[in-house]
Amino acid sequence: MLDCTLRIAKIIGRRAVEDAQTQSRSLESKDLKELRQSLQYSYIDLYNKLLFAITTLVVKLDSRWRRWVDNVFGLSDWASINQSLKDSEGECIEDLEAIHRYKADPGVQSSPFRNKSRNMLHHAAAMNFPDKVYEYVESRSFDVNAKTFNGSTALSLAAENGYFKVVRILSQVRGVDLDSQNKAGRTALHVAALRHRSATVRLLAEKGAKVDVKDGVGRTAFLDVARDGFTDVVKILKEKGADINQVTAKNGWSALHMAVWNDRLETVKYLVSVGIRRDIKAKGGVNAGKTARELAEAAKNLPVLEVLT
């Protein structure tokens, strides 16, 4: 949480200095105008994430709203939020460096996007411009599987934000990689699940996206949403073939362990109703050898214990 707070302060403090770089001039070349537009889009994307992070900070410091917002938005993954801010900040820095390079030597690059990882398709997807996305994919102006600074494709950017129309357009493009993973090892379906984008998760699964792809720390979307208590998403993933008895790579926790540990009662009820194994024991950490029920016993969580009895 502290790292996230410091990063927010750093970004806001530097933004005022860089503001002039986003303003286009009437006599500038087309390439330089496009670079400035790209920077503006990058900052809009970054500010959206800043607002999300600031809201999270406020909520976490106010216990009256903590449980409600956790259940709706799943705001417990501080490392992920901080990394998302870091990656978006990196996109802005990359745009700024491209502008400086171009101004130093306009002839050095024939395309303003040659040395940049985020193209206009990425921006259109991240900003929810379905008409523009359709235009770019129809004209094949950009590689639909091109990746940004943090390894996200246009599909992943749209999925993370729950932009259903954009996701539907991109998921139907010939050659699109539905299971492309970002630097954290997460697919479009995984990032959509983490943000509680139920309709997007269902759409991607119906289009053929794999539901059990493990991320960089060995967790799947199914395990993560069980942790966050997104029972509707848990149901969708189970319906689409997710292994309900899968475990985390690090400590061997099942989805039931995750739900019990985070006091997700409705998720616990659902997992039990569909027959998840209750005898799975954690393999590592301070709770090694414990079943989900034993976690509930240690926490004296009576409502969960009643379900598991």
Image (cartoon, rainbow, N blue to C red):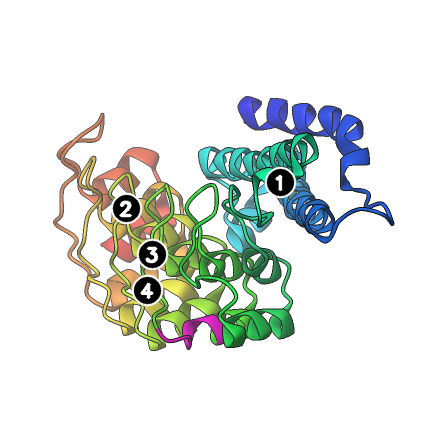
Which x, y percent locates residue 76? 48, 40
N-terminal label among 4 and 3: 3
Q: CA distance from mark 2 to mark 3?
A: 16 Å
N-terminal label among 2 and 4: 2
Disc 1 secondary structure class: helix
Disc 2 secondary structure class: loop
Indicate which disc residue 270 carries.
4
Residue for badge 2: 219
Which amino acid lies under the numbered mark 2 shown in the image of this protein? Arg
At horizontal 66% and vertical 23% (from top left) the residue drawn is 10
Task: Give left or right: position of 153 versus 163.
Answer: left
N-terminal label among 1 and 2: 1
The quarter of the picture where the N terminus appears is top right
Do callouts 1 and 3 mark residues in contact (Cβ within 8 Å)?
Answer: no
Which amino acid lies under the numbered mark 4 shown in the image of this protein? Tyr
At horizontal 78% and vertical 26% (from top left) the residue drawn is 17
Residue for badge 1: 107
Which x, y percent locates residue 257? 26, 45
Q: CA distance from mark 1 to mark 2?
A: 46 Å
The quarter of the picture where the C terminus appears is bottom left
N-terminal label among 2 and 3: 3
Which amino acid lies under the numbered mark 3 shown in the image of this protein? Ser
Residue ranking furthest to the right: 26
Indicate which disc residue 180 carries.
3
- Looking at the rendered image, the disc whose residue lies closer to the viewer, 2 or 4, is 2
